[in-house]
Image (cartoon, grey):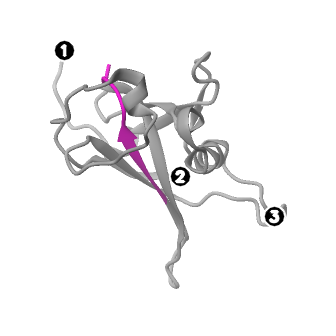
Amino acid sequence: MAIGKVLASTGIVEVDTAYPSGPTWVTVGGLLSVVKESQDTREDVGGLADQLKHVKTDTQPRWRARAYLLADPATPGTRDAGQAFLNTLAQQLYSASIGRVRITRPGGLTQTFICTVDVVDPADDIDGYATWEATFWVAGPTT
């Protein structure tokens, strides 16, 4: 096997739109970057009941994905399916706010986890394209 350079653009973020009964994976379109922002130092203190609190801490592992905002200007409100699903998930409360995300990093390493999500929608750059951003607050083990 030959070792070589890997294009950063091969990363993928997918969301399970049928969680918890799924999986039905939908890709988040327009991906520009995905970064893990903290170390996993949070202890599992209460299982699902703890996760339902939607509590975010500085030590809680989180991923941040940034993408071009994908929409159909001819049909207001029509969005990329992955971005639209995450926007809806971010507005939910309690157990309805928990989803499953799968991140495939450049090079093929896949990480799947349940999480809550915050969405910043959209960030406008007067000289460029609008962007969309999601933060995934990991609420369980990563597999």
Residue 120: tell me if it is visible: yes
Q: Which one is nearer the viewer's eye here, 10 or 110?
A: 110
The x, y position of residue 80, in whole percent, is 66, 49
Residue beneath the point at 51% across and 34% down? 98
Task: Specify start and end residues of the magenta stretch as a single range.
Answer: 133-143
- Locate residue 35 relative to residue 133 in the image: left or right: left
Work out how far the residue at label 2 is from the one at label 3, CA to CA, in angstroms.
Answer: 18 Å
Q: Secondary structure at mark 1?
A: loop
Q: Tell me if mark 3 has few (under 14), some (14-19) or many (20+) residues whose alpha carbon lies within 10 angstroms of its own.
A: few
Quadrant of image for the N terminus: top left
Residue tagged 1: 1
Judge the density around disc 2: few (<14), some (14-19), many (≥20) Cα neighbours within 10 Å. Answer: some
Amino acid beneath label 2:
Gly
The earlier-in-sequence mark between 2 and 3 is 2
User: Viewer-proximal residue, 5 or 76?
Assistant: 76
Quadrant assignment, res 82: top right
Q: Which of label 2 and label 1 is nearer to you?
A: 2
Amino acid found under the numbered disc labelled 1: Met
- Mark 3: amino acid: Pro
136 is within the stretch colored magenta: yes
Residue 103 seen: no
Q: Earlier in the sequence, mark 1 or mark 3?
A: 1
The mark closer to the camera, 2 or 3, is 3
Question: Residue 30 bears which disc, if any?
Answer: 2
Are the residues flagged by discs 2 and 3 in contact, CB closer than 8 Å? no
Is 32 on the left-hand or right-hand side of 81? left
Up the image or down, 121 lies above or below 115; here it is below
Q: Nearer the viewer, residue 62 or 5?
A: 62
Helix, strand or loop at disc 3?
loop
